């Protein structure tokens, strides 16, 4: 068995039989390498072999189409096109790294300290007792 270290997935490790397809191992073991087509067409699975590049098979024509010579020379591969014959470490760019800035914090709507003093409603005017004049018979 060979060991694959998914560096960009908190260094998660998985074992696989020799001559395993890197993307398949990632899928089976939830390694986390991004992918779309699985067929060497989209380039989503572009990854970097941090160590053990010598344990990967030869670069395919599809990889030469989607990766620059510079990328290939520096150890980049398409996971879906790469077969592994020994221990490797692989890393990749998380999908959503395009946004350069941090998301703006939600501005808390602080209530302005504008206490309005409403006039108190006038108390009900005194209800006068109506005294009935007693007619005293006298
Ligand atoms: S998943 Fe599309 S090129 Fe590998």
Image: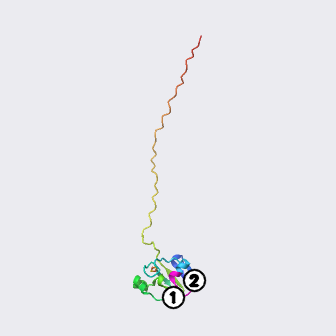
Place of residue 75 in the rendered image (x, y in percent of width and height, measured from the top left): 45, 84
Left or right: where does residue 43 sit relative to residue 17?
left
- Count of numbered labels shown in the rendering: 2
Q: Distance between the residues labelled 1 and 2?
A: 14 Å
Q: Is residue 12 above or below residue 18?
A: above
Give the mark, 1 or 2, whose residue is nearer the N terminus: 2
Q: Give the range drawn in magenta.
A: 14-24
Q: Magenta stretch: residue 138 in it?
A: no
Is 32 or 27 nearer to us in this picture? 27
Q: Helix or strand or loop: what does disc 1 sit on?
A: helix
Place of residue 66 in the rendered image (x, y in percent of width and height, measured from the top left): 41, 82
Q: Name the residue under label 2.
A: 15
Specify the quadrant that holds the C terminus: top right
Q: Does the residue labelled 1 lie within 8 Å of ligand 1?
A: no
- Residue 55: image tag: 1
Quadrant holding ligand 1? bottom left
Residue 28 figure quarter: bottom right
Place of residue 121 in the rendered image (x, y in percent of width and height, measured from the top left): 48, 36
Quick one: label 2, few (<14), some, or many (20+) residues within 10 Å? some
For the view shown, which residue lies furthest in the right direction? 138
Residue 29 figure quarter: bottom right
């Amino acid at each position: 068995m060979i060991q694959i270290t998914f560096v960009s997935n908190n260094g998660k490790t998985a074992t696989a039989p020799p001559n395993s397809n890197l993307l398949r191992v990632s899928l089976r073991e939830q390694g986390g390498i991004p992918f779309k087509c699985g067929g060497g067409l989209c380039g989503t699975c572009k990854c970097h072999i941090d160590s053990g590049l010598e344990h990967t098979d030869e670069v395919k024509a599809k990889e030469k189409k989607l990766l620059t010579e510079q990328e290939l020379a520096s150890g980049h591969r398409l996971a879906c096109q790469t077969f592994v014959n020994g221990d490797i470490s692989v890393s990749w760019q998380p999908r959503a790294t395009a946004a350069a800035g941090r998301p703006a914090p939600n501005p808390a709507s602080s209530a302005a300290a504008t206490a309005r003093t409403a006039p108190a409603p006038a108390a009900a005017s005194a209800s006068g007792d109506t005294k009935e004049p007693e007619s005293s018979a006298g």
